[in-house]
Amino acid sequence: MIKSILFLIACGSLSTDYKLGEVDSDPPDVEVVETDAPQETDPPIDTSVTPVDTGDGPVTPTGLVGGVLRFTRLDVPCQECFYEYTSNTRVSSVLVLHQPSNHSWNEWIPPTGTCTGYLSQNDPASQFYNVGTSVEITEGTQELSLFRAYNQGQPEYRMESSYPNDFSLYSLYDLSVPQNNTLGDFFIEGALHTPDQIFLLSPTEILNTFYTAFPPAIRRGGTTIAWEPDGDGLFFVIVDVYDSYGYYYLGGTLCVGEDNGSMLVTGLSSYPAGSLLAVYLYRYETTETMIPSNGSTLEGVGQVGLVGTATLAN
């Protein structure tokens, strides 16, 4: 689901001396480190769901959704602009396993090529499964533990880190769930695929650091965002709008498109010039695998993002 910044606070100056404070910010739930770009020899990602032999015979896919595994990395060039962030990178993951449902965790996504106001997402299921104190996601020799937490009384598994190396770009992650009385122990290979990093081409000034933050880089009538390289999934641009003093949240826009290198961001014409903006850019890639014990689908979501600042211009 979309989680937007909730408030902006001015800090003694009317130029760049602002901080954006957020309660949560992932695309709707949602980083720059040097890395090798994927080579042409990298194997294609197989997202098909096939029967799994558990020892008692193969389990047939039911077509129902039984959970979601999200893994997100967000880079924050102007960390000082945001109260929420204490470092320049946030890595987070969450796993939810639940009673199989006819609904997807990705149903909230608007049609590609559109910009709209923020959407809310209802969880596909009301009964979440407790599968022990922790689970693991792994990639090669890397192992990350997600620990049980409770969200409105429902169990889920979470981790958060400020270390960029905890998130491997353009990689496949496996999921290991220990023995439990609900679903039994299981291992899912390729439970999610992470995107490559974003290299912003224009307007690059939205990634300015503190002393040159909030440039007039986003226009009321529309602004083209350009990046590279192209990706394999969707691309989101989320813009949160605040008044020119930073005290009041006014609204925002969410634009969705193919990850093809450019997007026209609209939906801001009703807001006054001079409004302060938080601009989120996300790559969003999905996979589907099968939970071996009940044949339901685990939806994987890999996200890589950047957050910048701007002032709304005519």
Image: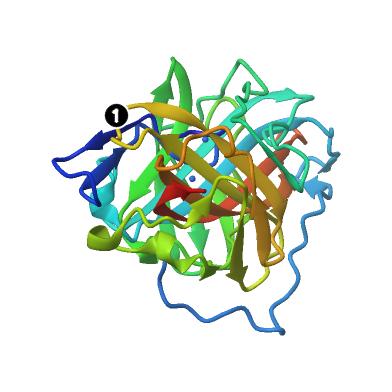
222 lies above or below 75: above
Q: Secondary structure at mark 1?
A: loop
What residue do we see at 38% from left, 66% from top? Answer: 165
Mark 1 highlights which residue? 247
Kindly give the residue lying farthest to the left in the view shown: 12
Give the camera-side residue of 196 and 247: 247
> Which quarter of the figure has residue 122?
top right
What residue do we see at 53% from left, 38% from top? Answer: 95
Locate residue 273, reporting x and y percent: 45, 41
What residue do we see at 27% from left, 54% from top? Answer: 79
7 lies above or below 261: above
Give the camera-side residue of 230 and 202: 202
Three-letter amino acid code at disc 1? Answer: Tyr
Locate residue 42, reporting x and y percent: 69, 79
What residue do we see at 76% from left, 70% from top? Answer: 44
> Which quarter of the figure has residue 110?
top right
Locate residue 199, reporting x and y percent: 52, 71
119 lies above or below 216: above
> Which quarter of the figure has residue 216?
bottom left
